Image: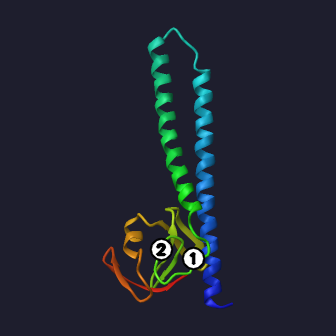
Amino acid sequence: MKETESFNILKKDAYHFCERFVNDRLTRIQKQIKELEAALSSETKSSAGDKHETGRAMIQLEREKLGQQLAELEKTQQLLSKVPKERKAQTVGLGSLVITNTFIYYIAISAGEFKIEPKSVYCISAATPIGKLVFGKAVGDVFSFNGNSLTIVSIQ
């Protein structure tokens, strides 16, 4: 198998890793919201009225926080849906698999490290510090991150 084909498979796998990351978080947040709603509906008025009201207020605050997380996750999901799966370009952009002399980056969403032996791919957003550094760069370009000099070897 040619190296280009190998990197194309790696790129598809990284995209699916990002999809699973979003779907897993979505499932977790939705489960937490359901649990909070159940807790809120099971809160019964007790003789300790202030304690009851404090409990309801705490649950309501937690629900609002989860609602914000859900809204952020929906934005992430929209961004991921716009990532081109078959991007062929001379410069780094959304959907690029960037191979440097040290690391491999997939420019999509911030989903963390995707390990597929013997390689690791860092799934990052274009808005992250490293994403901003590599965006628009071409093969052979050198950039510095955390005191390390990195050279772009290939863009898939």
Query: Which residue is labeled 1 in the image?
Result: 87
Q: Which amino acid does label 1 sit on?
A: Arg
Tell me the SS state at disc 1: loop
Tell me the SS state at disc 2: loop
Residue name at image x 61 percent, y 65 percent: 17
Residue 98 vs residue 6: left or right?
left
x, y percentage for residue 67?
Answer: 51, 39
x, y percentage for residue 56?
Answer: 50, 23
Q: Do the residues labelled 2 and 1 touch (CB within 8 Å)?
A: yes
Residue 155's mark?
none
Is 129 located above or below residue 48 in the figure?
below
Residue name at image x 61 percent, y 34 percent: 35
First in residue order: circle 2 vs circle 1: 1
Residue name at image x 41 percent, y 80 percent: 137
x, y percentage for residue 149?
Answer: 34, 83
**Residue furthest to the top:** 47
Residue name at image x 40 percent, y 76 percent: 134
Query: Which residue is labeled 2 in the image?
Result: 93
Q: What residue type is labelled 2?
A: Gly
Is 29 located above or below residue 20 in the figure?
above
Image quadrant where residue 4 sits: bottom right
Q: In which quarter of the image is the C terminus?
A: bottom right
| Along the viewing direction, whichever of 87 and 125 lies nearer the viewer | 87
x, y percentage for residue 98?
Answer: 49, 79
Mark 2, residues whose alpha carbon is within 10 Å: few (<14), some, or many (≥20)? many
